[in-house]
Every structure is written in C-alpha cells, then in structure tokens.
Amino acid sequence: MRKSAIAGVAAGALIAAGVAIPAAAVEDGMSELSVLHGIPDTPVDVYVNGENTIDDFQPGDLAGPLSLEPGDYEVALTATDAADDSEPVLGPITLTLEADMSYTAVAHLDADGNPTANLFTNDISETAAGEGRLTVRHTAAAPAVDVWADGAVLFENLSNPDEVMGDVPAATYEAAVSLTGETDPVLGPVDVEIADGVNTIVYAWGSAEAGNLDVAVQTVDTHASSPSGVAAGTQGLADERGVPAGAVAAILIALALALGAGARLAVTRR
C-alpha cells in the first residue's frame, strides 16, 4: 500500500494555497481522498498509518484531493505539539478506500457537540449535459431545519449527520430556510448558482451553542457528460419527489448556507 508521505506533501500545498481544487476523474485503479477539519478551536496534526501527514491542520481547512492506493488507512488526530499519535484527540479510525472512488473524511461535531468523524463517498457519476450536482452535508452541532419552496415546507427536521444530493440544471436559483417548526426564515430568499458538470459539496460545521457555525465548500468534477445529454441518475431529488429541478437546487443551497443543513434522501445515513 502506498504510504501517506506523498499525500501529505500534496495536502500541505493545498492548505497553504487556501483553496479547494475541483477533482478530475479518479485515476484508474486508485482512490481519491479529501480531508475536512470541522472541529472548532482545535488545531491538530493528522497521522496516517503512524506518520504525521498533515501538520497544524486548522479548523475549516480542506486538504486534497489525494490520490491513494485502495486499502485500509488508520487515521488519528493529535495535538499540534504531539511527538507521535499515541495520545490522539480523535481516533484512531480505520478508513477503507475502494478503487475508482472519491471520498471525503470529515472530523466534526455530532449533534450533541462531541468530536466524531465520518467518511463520505462523493458521487462522481456522470451528470446530464447542462446539469450540475449539489450535495449538502450537516456536520454541525446545530438545530434541525425546515426547507421551504414557494411558501411551503418541502423538507422537515433535517439534522446532523445526514446528507442530501440532487442533479439540477446549471443555473441561478432562489430559496429560503427556517428552524424546524418556525415560519420566519433564517436565510433567504437568496440567489445561488449550480455549475455544469461539478458536484458542489457544502458542509455546515461548528457549534450553534458556541456561536461558531460556519460553512465549507468542496467542488468535485463529475465524469463528463455527452453533448447530447444523458439521463440523470436515480439519486436526483426531482426523480425522488417529483419536485421541479429549479426548486430543488435553490432549497439545497439555502439549506447549506443556513448552517443547520442535512437530510437523508437518496443517500445512506452515517
């Protein structure tokens, strides 16, 4: 198995640049891994298979994508001044990566504010020509929310650690979000944009109680769609609920920006 030293160099370069670079299609036979640090006020070192791979990893930082050989990787987060990974603040956790798949490992708070971690699979399947994909992941210690479209609740009580995704036409949309059971929006209406052929992944992270909620955004290129167009996958929200695609895109983006996002729809619960 390829060790993580090479991956660490790539991760460090991306962190220093302070950007999240869209991932091209996964290299044949390899696995693609990004890492998001979503635990507030806790700088860490990230050890992979016993090696210090990401040094001084700051909350809100996104490292990757890294091209790794498929297999099991043991990951532990330690204090930034730790000599090794013998006393981790989180972990060790075993991440199993399969070939030709894209993943994001997220260290975050659960609904009760306790540190935890999840390995999410990023959908890089082909989108139809002229469409993009939106994925929203609730990784914050924050209340659940209701999502509104055209003055009516479309999704109720969306909470940590769920995720939701949908394929929609590339365009600019509008939406609003409220706390669960309330009618006054905490966000919206807002204009949002979905890019063609890109999976835009939005994370709500931080703690509502501590007042440090924030958003992280990751973009992952999907496999190219043909000019003639290919039917969207069955995971699209319009397929699941019969909701107009424009309303779906607006709702999902608003959900993420409201910092209380997360739903289970066409995706498995963590």
Image: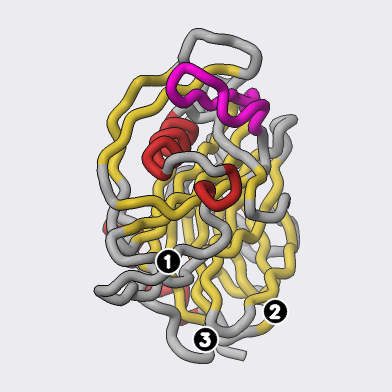
In the rendered image, which residue does mark 2 sit on? 72
How many angstroms separate mark 3 from mark 2 (CA)?
13 Å
Q: Amino acid at mark 1?
A: Gly
Residue 225: image location, x then y, percent: 33, 73
Provide the residue span drawn in magenta. Answer: 142-158
Q: Is residue 220 above or below residue 152?
A: below
Instruction: Examine the structure image and report whether residue 149 is included in the region drawn in magenta.
Output: yes
**Residue 47 appears anywhere in the view:** yes
Q: Quadrant of the N terminus?
A: bottom right
Residue 112: image location, x then y, percent: 74, 30
Disc number placed over residue 30 in the picture, else none: 3
Foreground disc of the pair 3, 2: 3
Which residue is at the front of the view, 161 or 185?
185
N-terminal of the pair, mark 1 or mark 3, is: 3
- The residue at 39%/63% (across/down) is 220
In the rendered image, which residue does mark 1 sit on? 64
Which residue is at the front of the view, 171 or 219?
171
How many angstroms separate mark 1 from mark 3 (CA)?
14 Å
Mark 2–mark 1 contact, CB under 8 Å?
no
- The residue at 58%/84% (across/down) is 99
